[in-house]
Image: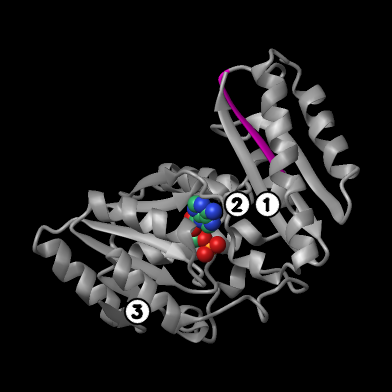
Amino acid sequence: MEVIKKIAEMKEISLCLKREGKSIGLVPTMGYLHEGHLSLIKTARRENDIIIMSNFVNPLQFGPKEDFATYPRDPDRDNKLAESAGVDYVFGPTSEEMYPQGYCTYIEVNGPMVEKMCGKSRPGHFKGVTTVVLKLFLITQPDRAYFGQKDAQQAIIVRKMVTDLNVPVKIITCPIVREEDGLALSSRNTYLSSEERIQALALPRALSAGRDMILKGETDPLKVKQHITSILASSPGIRLDYVEVVNGDDLSDLSAIKGKVLLAAAVYVGKTRLIDNIDLEV
Ligand code: AMP
């Protein structure tokens, strides 16, 4: 496995690989790898000749009061894990390499899918995401790019960007990997104290209760949303950011629960913001 820090070098390697007829799978990450990231890499490994994993904590997608400075980083450990999962190239540029002095070009998906959920709570976040993702696509020339359902809104918005801009990349969404007790894996889980780690379980528990309600026949999205909200509101240590019950393809509002449905929530446990979701087909 090779670690590449320079855009020009990564571009040259990718273009050479394409000329040789090799298929490239890209797994974009912000590092501090866990089994969720590794599941994306393993899926990519099965479907492509070459795997590129980007490891870049993207300053553009963090708000001024968010955790960019404290976001956990351990590139040496990441490189070992990436290599054993079958990554061929890690692309790990600096912020200055990606956004040199004078950088001023941004990619923005507009409309309802960015105006709700994390887009509402984190203004500018998805503009940062789509900008870095398009840059990564242009640098690494992937045939396929792998995203986690954990960040369902991100995957939907990236898919929309790719469709609207005719980017020749297939977006593949991989299932959420959870701890045995149900908590979705996240690099931010390392922020949680042992007490908060237990309190955080209210998030998957509330979403599962919403799903159970639907499976028992509830068709009113508002009632499901209220049920999830009431569980979270009465859970110790939890501060609610949002709960949504929406169309799982495009995050549009539902008049009734039918087809692809996404139950999504974000909460604060202490100072840590956690997101989670469950998608189902009714
Ligand atoms: P991050 O490093 O948190 O930006 O995540 C990089 C990629 O890994 C994103 O596409 C995430 O959706 C995905 N990911 C993060 N956590 C999980 C998880 N628990 N299960 C599956 N994919 C995940």
Image mark for residue 7: 3
Disc 3 C-beta below 8 A from ligand 1: no
Discs 2/1, front: 2
Mark closest to the chain's N terminus, 3 or 2: 3
Mark closest to the chain's N terminus, 3 or 1: 3
The CA distance from mark 3 to mark 1 is 31 Å
| Corner quadrant of residue 17 | bottom left
Q: Does 12 sit above or below residue 163?
A: below
Q: How is the image coloured?
A: one colour
Residue 254 visible in the picture: no
Q: Which residue is mark 2?
A: 184
The CA distance from mark 3 to mark 2 is 32 Å
Q: Which residue is mark 1?
A: 275
Residue at the left extreme, as displayed: 20
**79 to the left or right of 47:** right
What residue is shown at x 61% (from left), y 17% (from top)?
A: 258
Q: Amino acid at mark 2?
A: Ala
The quarter of the picture where the C terminus appears is: top right
| Corner quadrant of residue 61 | bottom right
What residue is shown at x 65% (from left), y 70% (from top)?
A: 190
Crowding at mark 1 (Cα within 10 Å: few <14, some 14-19, many 20+):
many
Disc 2 C-beta below 8 A from ligand 1: yes
Q: Amino acid at mark 3?
A: Ile
What are the residue bounds of the magenta stretch? Answer: 259-265
What residue is shown at x 30% (from left), y 69% (from top)?
A: 84
Q: Amino acid at mark 1?
A: Ile
By secondary structure, the bulk of the magenta-drawn segment is best described as strand
Q: Does 168 sit above or below residue 7?
A: above
Q: Position of residue 249 (x, y in %)?
A: 54, 32
Label 3 element class? helix
Discs 3/2, front: 2
